[in-house]
Image (tube, rainbow, N blue to C red):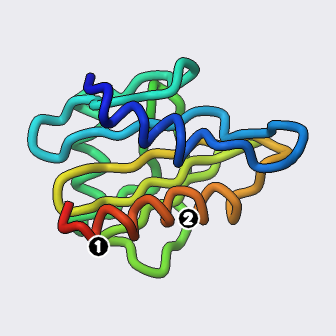
Amino acid sequence: MSDGWQAYVDNNLMCPLDEAGTTLSSAALAGLEDCSVWAQSPSFPGFSSEEIEAVKGIMDGKNPGSFTVGGVKYMVIMSEDPSTKLRGKCKGGGCSICKTNQALIVGIWQEPVTASICNKIVEALYEYMISVDY
């Protein structure tokens, strides 16, 4: 894991959402090519190379009804751009994943955080990384 990438997780994905300090449950950045986690929040459940490959497959057009992150199963829900944005729902929470040219950005939420808030946070970092050709 890289300290440089860790700052993106800490400062962009795990930033406080309100005055009470509510955050996403966990977050990570993973490499598309090496299928490894580059940086993660302390509570991130893990993301095996097999899970990363499966997520990449879904985003490349294979369309199973679910995916896993850290062994937690998420049911795929619709996305406006399934080739770069994957959404999943599980009991009491969900997962948002965006794919840049070189990385997967993963945000996991539990209630009271909502899917739309998680999507907004993950997509903001996605937009930045795309803007700098990453």
Q: Position of residue 92 (x, y in %)?
A: 77, 41
**Residue that mark 2 sits on:** 77
Q: Residue at x 51, y 37 (%)?
A: 27
Secondary structure under tag 2 reads strand
- Closer to the camera, 73 or 3? 3
Horizontal side of 7 relative to 107 (left or right) equals left
Amino acid carrying mark 1 in the image: Ser
Q: Which mark is residue 91?
A: none
Q: Position of residue 19 (x, y in %)?
A: 88, 44
Q: Residue at x 46, y 38 (%)?
A: 9
Image position of 123 with respect to 2: above or below: below
Assess disc 1: are there few (<14), some (14-19) or many (≥20) residues with their C-alpha within 10 Å of its C-alpha: few
Q: Residue at x 63, y 47 (%)?
A: 94
Amino acid carrying mark 2 in the image: Ile
Q: Position of residue 3 (x, y in %)?
A: 32, 26
- Closer to the camera, 75 or 21? 21
**Residue that mark 1 sits on:** 131
Q: Nearer the viewer, mark 1 or mark 2?
A: 1
Q: Based on the displayed image, in which of its 4 quarters is residue 119 positioned?
A: bottom right
Assess disc 2: are there few (<14), some (14-19) or many (≥20) residues with their C-alpha within 10 Å of its C-alpha: few
Q: Residue furthest right?
A: 20
